[in-house]
Amino acid sequence: MSVKRFIFIFPAFLLLLALAPLLVQNYFGTYLIPNFWALFFIFGGFSLIVLPLALWQMNISVKSSGQALLATIAFRFIFGLVVLLIYLLNFNVIAGIFMLNFFYLYFAHMGFEIYCLLCNLRT
């Protein structure tokens, strides 16, 4: 995947990802956790840093493509656990609603990351 394509696709992905929480916020405000949008931008910023680095590594060496894919997945997992721990230590939340919000962001960004990296592996 080229940098130009990533620059076009990533903002479109963020806009589509923000659509559901905006609708939930307008109609069912109690289903969003406190500081949801802060988490949204933290995950977006992390993806904006990690994905171009992984794509760059994959373009340098074909042999390290699999390692780059696994490294980004591992970093996302560790980063997600750190964010989860910090958030839960600072805010009192309802478990079910928090799980829906957190995993919506986590799995959506992970799916986008895997899609981008697999597109790069195919070429």
Image (cartoon, rainbow, N blue to C red):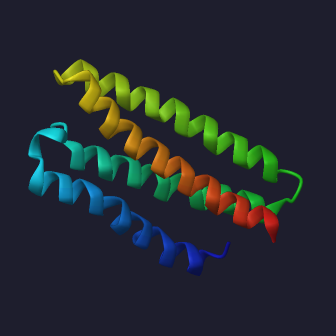
The residue at the far right in this view is: 63
Q: Quadrant of residue 81?
A: top left
* Apparent side of residue 95 relative to residue 84 in the rendered image (left or right): left
Q: Position of residue 78 (x, y in %)?
A: 52, 30
Residue 37 against residue 74 in the figure, above or below: below
* Apparent side of residue 27 relative to residue 63 in the rendered image (left or right): left
Is residue 22 or residue 63 the one in the foreground? 22
The residue under the point 26% across, 22% down is: 95
The residue under the point 14% across, 52% down is: 25
Quadrant (top left, top right, bottom left, bottom right) of the N terminus? bottom right
Q: Position of residue 107 (x, y in %)?
A: 48, 44
The residue under the point 63% across, 59% down is: 115
Number of numbered discs visible in the structure rendering:
0
The residue under the point 36% across, 60% down is: 17
Residue 78 against residue 17 in the figure, above or below: above
Q: Quadrant of residue 123?
A: bottom right
Is residue 116 or residue 56 the one in the foreground? 116
* Apparent side of residue 103 relative to residue 111 in the rendered image (left or right): left
* Apparent side of residue 40 relative to residue 80 in the rendered image (left or right): left
Q: Position of residue 18 (x, y in %)?
A: 30, 60
